[in-house]
Image (cartoon, coloured by chain):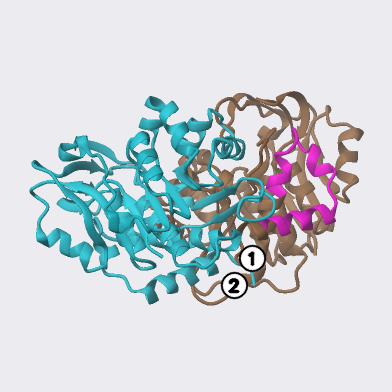
Chain colours: A brown, B cyan
Amino acid sequence: MSIVVVGSVAFDDITSPSGTVKGVLGGAATYFALAASYFAPVRLVAVVGDDFGAEHEAILKKHGIDTCGIERAPGKTFRWGGTYIDNLNEAKTDFTDLNVFEKFSPQIPKAYEDSEFLFLANIQPTLQANVRRRMNGVRLTGCDTMNYWIQRTRTELAETLKLVNVLLINDTETKMLANEKNLPRAAHKVLAMGPQALVVKHGEYGATIFFREGAFGIGRHPFRAPTLPLEEVKDPTGAGDSFAGGFMGYLAAQEELNREVLKRALFYGGVMGSFAVEEFGTTRLQQLTREEIDARFQIFRELTHLE
Amino acid sequence: MSIVVVGSVAFDDITSPSGTVKGVLGGAATYFALAASYFAPVRLVAVVGDDFGAEHEAILKKHGIDTCGIERAPGKTFRWGGTYIDNLNEAKTDFTDLNVFEKFSPQIPKAYEDSEFLFLANIQPTLQANVRRRMNGVRLTGCDTMNYWIQRTRTELAETLKLVNVLLINDTETKMLANEKNLPRAAHKVLAMGPQALVVKHGEYGATIFFREGAFGIGRHPFRAPTLPLEEVKDPTGAGDSFAGGFMGYLAAQEELNREVLKRALFYGGVMGSFAVEEFGTTRLQQLTREEIDARFQIFRELTHLE
């Protein structure tokens, strides 16, 4: 079953202890789409400028990603520059040129309307809600957000959260959204806002999924998936979006959506995040095979499972 | 098989968002001994002052802990005061009165010498090394240390590390000891200093065990254990020592020491740490049953294991 992803396509300048790249294809929707494409057909909704050429579209098309939802607007594509110095967990933003992304008003092509899975990458919450409302036949909606929207558009975000099934955010965002310092308590407050499940991403420590009582199964026991302890993280950009891509992609390929399936999806999220950071930009995500992905899934299992 | 633990016994004043307690029995060796006592016989080496009464000793004796290695010195027992405000992961130290602990020179009773397991809690590295050298028949030595010793007594600590099998420290200490920011790379540098295995404690995110190539089994794949997402952490004091107690205690009760056994020990470490923080001081560690411990072990398993 296909997934629609709505979010940013960008060109990034990135500096990390491993080097520097300039103008590489990035953006939340790009990382998500490439990661998810190994599991299910992906349909992209985004806006790009005149500088987005056939060579960029070819990267997406090669992975079977439907690009008919990419709007071409006059001007430049969203550009972002970030530097990872001491802390690979957090980029210092060098510049953010929104360009055509500033007026992004996502339009869902008719051909996308039968999609059963939807991922709302990190954009303004009202835009997210509008997209969700237009996709009536959707079976499961995943959603991302960030501290910027939590602080500035809390009311709008609260409306969006009523419409989504799984929210994927990090520890800090969870605590900020719930106004609560204890993570499990914060998680249950967030679940009370609407989502049936909350995935809290812990960076290098993996992720935890919290379930609302009775959602996708019995009880509300959380589940934790690891990340891979990597000896070199070249570029953490897009790790969270790649995680979401692996998570949603795996779900979209399953018959049934139950707890066990969501737990496995959490592992696949970690797997795709661990690949993304091995090379700059989306380089690694462009070169994978499903066999490599499943081999790493096994490594994640061995990393955490007793005999 | 019995475990000798060498370290501090203290009286603590603790303040957390859940309340305040004064003069409660604490110290690394106390937390360790109580946690380990559910798995194997424990023998304690420590120093206390005139204020350590029969009622305190009774707490230890009730758990079958051998107290003949507790030296009574004139003066007061080590006293520590700490406050957890915004951050439950790190105490703000209000005071440290070393008292009789300042001149602690650990003496191993003759009756302890046949012990096969030894845990060197966080004391000056040369004292740790001296104890290790006196315990010739030991099969496995665990060791803790802290940033204070890493910064001030690096040479002495390096000597100690040559004599221990498993070092248990946190992320920051591992990176500081290795002078390396990437955790897996730091871990392998620390393993090159002597220990066959390194347990890195991640606080609320669990712990990872790294193995030296070929130690306790084949290869050097790490293994990760979780902690329990708790809705209330009343008092984080002693969580790491309780972790070490569960880890070493489980090992001391096994016939063979292989990778699988060390992985399970990592889970039991997390289990005992998760109990310790549920009440102030050692309250929770004093009241457990082995059934409760094994039930929580199952919860840890369900938290991390796919079907």
Quadrant housing residue A49: top right
Please give the name of the residue rendered at 42% of the width and 45% of the height, measured from the top-left corner: B143
Tell me the element at label 1: helix
* Residue type pointed to by label 1: Leu
Q: Give the quadrant of the N terminus of chain A.
A: bottom right
* Residue type pointed to by label 2: Phe
Tell me the element at label 2: loop
The answer to whether the residues at label 1 and label 2 have Cβ atoms under 8 Å apart is: yes
Prevailing secondary structure class for the magenta stretch in the rendered image? helix
Where does residue B121 sit, x and y in percent of width and height?
35, 46
Q: In terms of depth relative to the viewer, which is nearer, B253 or A295?
A: B253
Quadrant housing residue A231: top right
Mark identifier at residue A216:
2
Q: Is residue B88 visible?
A: yes
Give the residues drawn in magenta, as a range.
Answer: A272-300
Chain letter for the residue marked with disc 2 in the picture: A
Q: In this view, does B262 lie to the left or right of B10?
A: right
Q: Does the magenta stretch include residue A149?
A: no
Please give the name of the residue rendered at 59% of the width and 72% of the height, measured from the top-left corner: A216
Q: Is residue A180 visible?
A: no
Q: Give the quadrant of the C terminus of chain A.
A: bottom right
Q: Is residue A34 left or right of residue A194?
A: right
Residue matched to label 1: A262
- Foreground disc of the pair 1, 2: 1
Q: How far apart are marks 1 and 2 (CA)?
A: 8 Å
Q: Is residue A273 magenta?
A: yes
Q: Which of marks 1 and 2 is nearer the N terminus?
A: 2
Please give the name of the residue rendered at 70% of the width and 52% of the height, measured from the top-left corner: A271
